[in-house]
Image (tube, helix red, strand yellow):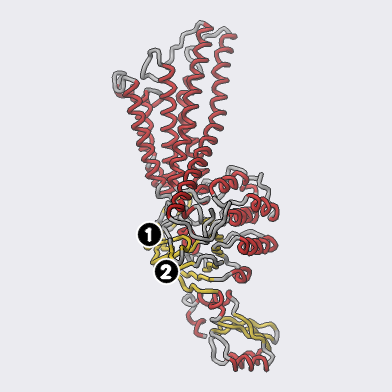
Amino acid sequence: MSVTNAAPSRVEREAFAARVHARAVRKVTRYVAAVGLFMGAFYWGIFLVVTVALPVIANMAGGVLEGGAMVGAEYSARWFAFSVGIAALAMAVTTHLAAGGTRRALWLGSLRGSLAVAVPFGAALVVGLVVEGALFEAFGWTHDLPRGSGLTSGGGWLLVSGLAEALVVATYLVAAMALGAAYYSHGALVGTLWIPFALVLLLLTDGALRTGAGDDALTALLGEERMPGTPVVGFLAGLLLLAVATGWFWSQLRSITLRPAR
Amino acid sequence: MTPAPFGARLDDVVVRFGTRRRMTSDGTLVKDDDATALDGVDLQIRPGTITGVLGRNGAGKSTLLSLLAAFTRPTGGEVRVGPDSDGQQAWEDPWENPWVTSNVQLVRESGDLQDEEKVSESLKYYADLRPAWDSDLAGRLLDLFEVNPRKKPAALSRGKRSAVGATIGLASRAPLTIFDEVYLGMDAPTRYAFYDEILADYAEHPRTILLSSHLVEEVERLFEDVIVLHRGRVLLAETAEEMQGRGFSLTGPATAVDDLVDGRRVLHRQRLGGTVQVTLEGAPGDGERESARAAGVELGTLPLQDLFVRLTQVDADPERSRR
């Protein structure tokens, strides 16, 4: 590393700033992805073991299952991701800013890291559904409980379910970070006031992608014929809601200050 | 590329905090009252110096230092940070400015470590973000301070956590390195080792160092410039040399010393048996030097701590200041 006492030119300064910004974004991306994937590996590892073990044990006992463990995974994986999102931001924010990173780098890195976590979550769901389906077929059982995304029941059902799960998990992760940033930035009172907004956002996300408890609630409220009925509309609505979560996250993160330590 | 040492300028800076409730890491709800931390601060920090930032508790030291590292933003006024450029100050607002923030390292007493990770993971984070990070130096300092980087911060004593903070500050090699009371919890040998490391590294890698401390007597030998804050305002900002010219001490037999005081303002007085030491305001004249020598009274420099105590207690106890 060369050392110079001369002040750099504007061009050098901007190049330097761009380099350190890119490094900071990469660092946060890796950090959020590592935390999410590490925790997610435990979660999905346990669920996949149960997904296999449950029907096998039931079959050995001479029983018949109406639905497997993946139903539970669909409902809970997003909330697990939500808690991971809160933890990941809380663990990174102080050290990141103290190490000279900007809020913008933290935001961008967190978004990229969330996507890096969300895609494997979607893939894990697909693997679980395939494995569970194969076991049910092998044992001659029919699956009576709804599984995967309700956006389609056709040939692309697995792919749509996996993509929908990835989009849902990404939105939950980003919303969790936004809520964590709200608590960090504004304190307990104002942070709590943001919870209803987060819940509505996540409810709409579930409903747009036709999965999870939010979809069940909206279906019970509005009926089965409500929008969206096609994958294209559902994914566009899901992307729009992810964009809202992303904007909300930035609005909370951009003004975060580290108060004097006490 | 490691830029030249950074300086800083604050123009009419005001920082106010509103009331809020926040959750601490151990789950306790804490109420922060509203307060004006800085109130119209005008200040310039010279690049390439070690500057002491002194003030009583709540004087606004930590807030001032947080502004320079973009940990927080001023409510009013302007903050500029950067290196000198051919005599011109190419200084910029540090807020969300990666050019500035990556070159300014503020180490706070809390250490700003990842509580759930090993110390080595936090250091890795700093190493990845700090352009001039020196891993060899970090390793050597951890050995010197006897810190095990495989432990989590919660498993370290307060002094060891402070030592990690000292390590981060020195190993960052940031053109503006700020230590905000990082000595807390350190035992005396560790503190002195830390001061020696600051001087050695400063000599080898010139930069601007700001040091906030209540242990004035211990650290004053390091200072080239001194800033004294009081109740959110700058009481004094000048070179250590100028500061020392503000007074002097006399040590000797009580009667001889009392004769020499001769109506001058006494900043501090202490007595041990028949020997008295007084700290006086102003510079000694040639006649006073001769008289002191003749009376067997030793003439010394102004202890910074005495001046600091005097400056920051004037309005708290006006009667005493007139005595």
Residue at the spot of label 1: B75
The disc numbered 2 marks a residue on which chain?
Answer: B
Residue that sits furthest to the top in the current view: A140
- The residue drawn where x is 52% and y is 68% is B55
The one nearer the camera, A77 or A27, is: A27
Can see residue B90? yes
Label 1: element kind: loop
Q: Position of residue B106 (x, y in %)?
A: 53, 57
Viewer-proximal residue, B73 or A4?
Answer: A4
Seen in the image, is B9 located left or right of residue B156? left
Work out how far the residue at label 2 is from the one at label 1, CA to CA, in angstroms.
14 Å
Mark count = 2
Instruction: For label 1, count other residues whose C-alpha is less than 10 Å away and answer few (under 14), some (14-19) or many (20+).
Output: some
Image disc number at residue B42: 2
Left or right of B277? Residue A85 is left
Tag in front: 2 or 1: 2
* Residue A257 appears in the picture as rendered: no
Q: Choose between B204 and A59: the one closer to the eye.
A: B204
Vertical order, B266 against A42 (above or below): below
Instruction: Name the amino acid, label 1.
Output: Thr
- Whether B188 is drawn above or below B137: the answer is below
Amino acid type at mark 2: Asp
